[in-house]
Structures are given as C-alpha cells and as structure tokens.
Image (tube, rainbow, N blue to C red):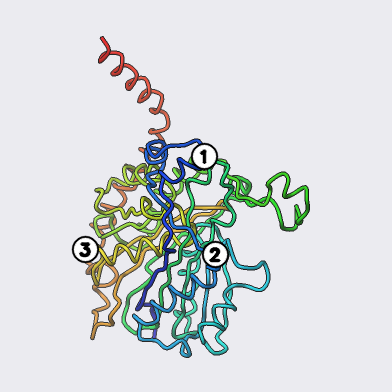
Amino acid sequence: MSKYARITGWGKYVPERRLTNFDLEKMIDTSDEWIRTRTGIRERRIAAPGETCCSMSLASARQALAMAHLPPSDVELIIVATSTPDYLVPAVASMVQDRLGAGNAPAFSLQAGCTGWVYALVTASQFIQTGAYRNVLVIGTEHLSVGVDWTDRATCVLFGDGSGAVVLEASDQPTGLLSFDLGSDGSDYDALIFPGCAGVHPPSHDVINQRLHYLRMDGRRVFKFASRVLADSVRKVVIDSGLTIDDIALIIPHQANDRIIELARRRLKVPPEKMMVNIDRYGNTSAASIPLALVDALDEGRIQPGDRVVFVGFGAGLTWAAAAFHWEPQEPMSIPVLDWPVRERLAQPVARARTALWSARISLATKVEPLLLPLYGFAAGYRKRRKKE
C-alpha cells in the first residue's frame, strides 16, 4: 500500500530581543524609511548570549512534537536545515537528537541556504513514501546574527534569527507532497557567501582583518536570480501536480525582500491574500523563514484542512526549491482516490487547458517585463515633471 506524508505538528521559536529599524538608525547610517521601502522589514529577532542553533531548534521541535502528540523517543529521523550550525563538526542535528531525547534516531544537517527547509521537507517526504520511516522531524533554524557585519548597512539590516519545525507522519490516505522542484546554479556561488574560516580561507589574522568571516552578498545578482526563479518554480510545481493556480489556497515564499515577493505575485497573477508575507516581523531568517511563515499563516487561520499550499524559496548556492503540498493534518476516515489530488478525472482536461493558458501568460510576462522597466522609469519621471509644471 502506498504511503503518504502528512504534517501533523508544527512549532516555531524566535528570540525575545527585537532589533527595530529605529535601533539600527543609532548604529549605522540608515533610516527606518530607507529599510522599509527597499525590503519591507520593520524589525528582526536577535539571539541572546547563550542562544544557539541547537537551543532554538530544540524549542521549535518540542512545540511541533507536542502538537503531533509524538514523544521524542518515538522520532525515527531528524533533519535540520541550517547554514549557521553551532560547529562545523559535529552536525547540529546530532546535538538536537541527543538533547531532545530522541533515543538513537538518525540525524543529519542539510545545507542549501535559504531553500534548505524545502529541500529537507522533500527529503523527509520521500523517506516516508518509501516506507523507510514512519515519522520525521524537519527543522529549519538560523543563527545569522553571529555572521552579520554590523558595520555593513547593505547586509546587517536584512537578517534575523529564528527556528521553525514540522513533524511528518506516514498516512495510508492520499495527502502531503504533490510535486516539487529543486535546482541549483553554482555559477553564482559567490553572490551570497561566508568567504572565510573554512577550507579556502582558513581561520587567520588576515581573514579577521579583511572581515572575511562575515556574510557577504551581491544584492543585484541575488535579486536578479530570485526574480526569475521564484515565479518559474511555483509555476512548475503547480503544473506538475495537476493543479491550477486557482486551486492554491496560499503561497508561502522565502521572506527575503517584499519587492521580490511582490514581483513574483504579479507575475503569477494571484491576489495579495494568496501570498504569505511576514518579513516585517522577522527579516530574512534564511532556512527558518518558510516554516516561520507557515506557522504564522496557520495561527492567522489562512490555511484550512484540505487546502493546497506552495512553499517556494531561493538562496545561497544559488539554489531554488518549491513544493506543492496538500494540507491535511488530521487523517480523515476516507478520501476517494479519484478526488485527489485535484478533482475527478473527467475535469482534468479542463484544468490542464486552464493551467497551460495561465503558464503561457506568465512566461510572456516574465520575458517582456524586463524590457519595459526603462519605460516604467521614463513614465514615472514624466509624471513627476508634469506635477511640477
């Protein structure tokens, strides 16, 4: 019998300390208005001394396990997605496994930048679908504040700390992962990078003096990459799952910049209420951002049992990832197979035709929009001149 992976529990943790844009005004040459208009961020959470990737992971994991009514001793696999572990060796997942009390459950960390949690979700789902494990704990955690150069206003305004976790459990009823899209373009690996304190630039006085132990980002390259892959990846998983965009209740994107999210929303031609945005509360928390946004969306009542949601992210590597997911936390008594994942078979040709038309419109907009940007700028300048006259 086929197995499916339901999300049965979820939890989050964010540090108590709020670092607002007004706080940053006192630290560097910036302003609340400058940050908000360019990123959408109002504040971010910063870990206190003693708070670590491990401790934040434990906090979110315990919430998720409690909701799923799953004792830590019954956890069969732990995956922690992070780019900011407590140590290069050992994997922070092993530390979480021990301190959680998860017996001898296998545990590993997964590093794929801001897309790490979606990579981990897809990986966990396949472990369950093959029958290898009955449940998997998937955590996304980042302790980015330790790697931020607080003198660099281009990056320090962006990042925050936090953790989100989910429990996936095996189900006999169709649900869970519908389709996924994972990708990488390593040609731009250095667009978002910690250049120092590893193999290429081992720890040294020169590394410290050159500030190579801090995160560096080429914002233009990352923005250009994200603007292209975000909408394309959503479109792919929607098509591959047999859905139409109208079937999607909510899209939960990586929270890096609300301009990028808004651009993707317009290209996908979805209303604002179908796009989850909480970047104003936490900033960019990398691998933690999508699970944090998921938990907030659930708390706000924006996802209901039976809904289809799409998780999508982009990040260091450069990588991208998207997953279409059927949300059914409580296993129903029975779901007719013909009704899942979309609709009766007789209606599928119509759905495919609608999806093809929607996909073609998005593809055309994606190609034409960059060509029109200079015209937008000219038109804006013309309107300003007319107002002055």
Measure the alpha-carbon separation of dots 1 and 3: 58 Å
Q: Is 189 situated left or right of 34 in this image?
A: right
Measure the alpha-carbon separation of dots 3 and 2: 57 Å
Percent of width and height locating residue 210: 72, 44
Q: Which residue is mark 1?
A: 28
Q: Residue furthest top?
A: 389
Figure quadrant of residue 369: top left
Badge 2 crowding class, 10 Å Cα cut-off, few under 14, some 14 to 19, many 20 or more, is: few
Q: Is residue 210 visible?
A: yes
The amino acid at mark 1 is: Ile
Does the residue at mark 1 contact the one at mark 3 (Cβ under 8 Å)? no
Q: Which residue is found at the position 47% from the left and 41% from the top?
A: 26
- Marking on residue 347: 3
Above/below status of 356 relative to 132 = above
The quarter of the picture where the N terminus appears is bottom left
The amino acid at mark 2 is: Pro
Percent of width and height locating residue 203: 75, 56
Q: Is residue 132 visible?
A: no
Percent of width and height locating residue 160: 47, 55
Measure the alpha-carbon separation of dots 1 and 2: 22 Å
Figure quadrant of residue 339: bottom left
Q: Which residue is found at the position 46% from the left and 59% from the top?
A: 181
Q: Earlier in the sequence, mark 1 or mark 3?
A: 1
Mark 3 lies on a secondary structure that is helix
Q: Earlier in the sequence, mark 3 or mark 2?
A: 2
Mark 2 lies on a secondary structure that is loop
Q: Nearer the viewer, mark 1 or mark 3?
A: 1
Q: Which residue is mark 2?
A: 49
Mark 1 lies on a secondary structure that is loop
Above/below status of 183 relative to 131 = above
In front here: 45 or 139?
45
Q: Nearer the viewer, mark 3 or mark 2?
A: 2
